[in-house]
Image (cartoon, coloured by chain):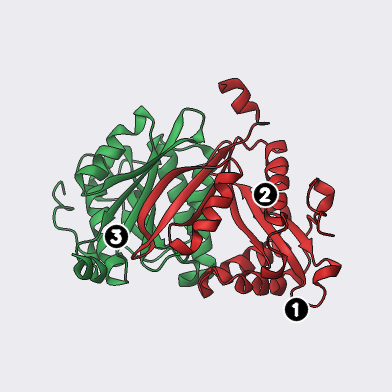
Chain colours: A green, B red
């Protein structure tokens, strides 16, 4: 199972939302140790809103259900991604969340989730994918992850999250998007 | 009435939301000519969500009800502001909307709405107020307005809203906030 995520495709991940994902996402996001309780609550709310409103909520999900080799763990999810069109824009999408359970990290799952999210977004008109993350030292691996996936730092907003905790805005112009072809 | 907004205070504007504000905000925002139909819809939705959920929606409003000298106009509002705490942050607030009816512009109403919004936000823990606007030439007066109110450009995100339409992020560290005193 170590190479399960080497060649991602839409079929690799579950795209529909189940009621049990609310708790599963809450547990997963908490388990990473990267998020405040308010942020964990927001992650779960996006799942809940999607269960209630369906597509109209505007959130797309990719769930990596627990694989057999992590079956000893309490998480029902190995990882997940949540992304969507920013309705204030023509073709900018936001990657709201991407999280991989600690015991499932280092196997390319985050990279696979991101690649499939970009693929699905581009097919729906996304020209640029935007990600916000923290400028704190703890998040250096997160920033390096995005940089290694073709993202660049577009802005750093001082003290945005809290005093001493900047917001770093990263962006990738999707290569398959119509806009990037026109503007190339 | 020309000097009605020179000395703003919380009492100058209505803070509670009425059902008729949904349409009034939609008409006001459309009348400015600055916003796309999707953006106008979002402006109205924030009012609607606040009517349904109350404070839990997280949006604060300031309404400038139509004054007598603009009574010939069809707008029920001379202007309004919508702002709120960004729950992903400790003490950052967003100014979501500020709009003044065309026939009520040039009298300091926008400046008064902004001042009272900042005052109310600071009283509730806001240390920095953030505003997103467009980098297009049409929005130069908007950007100049914020710059003249003590805001600075924190970032410019290329093609964010649409190809050729950057997002400009402005911020003001509120002088009355505890955080800015501690960090001064």
Depth check, mark 1 against mark 3: the one in front is 1
Tag 2 secondary structure:
helix
* Residue ID for mark 1: B74
Where, by quadrant of the figure, is residue B176 drawn?
A: top right
Q: Is residue B93 left or right of residue B155?
A: right
What residue is drawn where x is 48% and y is 58%? A47
Question: Quick one: label 1, few (<14), some, or many (20+) residues within 10 Å?
Answer: few
Give whichever of B153, A41 is nearer the camera: B153
Tag 3 secondary structure:
helix
* Residue ID for mark 3: A117
Q: Position of residue B24 (x, y in %)?
A: 72, 72
Mark 1 to mark 3 CA distance (whole Å): 46 Å
What residue is drawn where x is 76% and y is 77%? B73
What mark, if any, has residue B19 been given in the picture? none
Nearer-N-terminus badge (2/1): 1
Badge 1 vs badge 3, beta-carbon distance below 8 Å: no
* Residue ID for mark 2: B114
Q: Position of residue A179 (x, y in %)?
A: 26, 69
């Amino acid at each position: 199972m170590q190479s399960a995520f080497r060649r991602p495709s839409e079929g690799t991940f579950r795209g529909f939302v189940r009621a049990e994902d609310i708790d599963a996402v809450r547990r997963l996001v908490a388990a990473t140790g990267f998020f405040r309780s308010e942020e964990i609550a927001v992650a779960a709310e996006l799942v809940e809103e999607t269960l209630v409103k369906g597509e109209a909520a505007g959130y797309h999900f990719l769930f990596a259900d627990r694989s057999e080799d992590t079956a000893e763990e309490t998480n029902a999810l190995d990882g997940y991604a949540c992304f969507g069109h920013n309705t204030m824009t023509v073709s900018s999408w936001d990657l709201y969340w991407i999280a991989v359970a600690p015991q499932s990290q280092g196997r390319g799952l985050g990279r696979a989730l991101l690649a499939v999210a970009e693929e699905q977004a581009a097919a729906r008109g996304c020209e640029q994918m935007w990600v916000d993350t923290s400028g704190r030292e703890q998040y250096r691996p997160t920033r390096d992850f995005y940089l290694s996936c073709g993202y660049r730092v577009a802005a750093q907003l001082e003290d945005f999250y809290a005093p001493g905790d900047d917001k770093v805005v990263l962006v990738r112009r999707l290569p398959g998007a119509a806009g990037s072809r026109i503007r190339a």
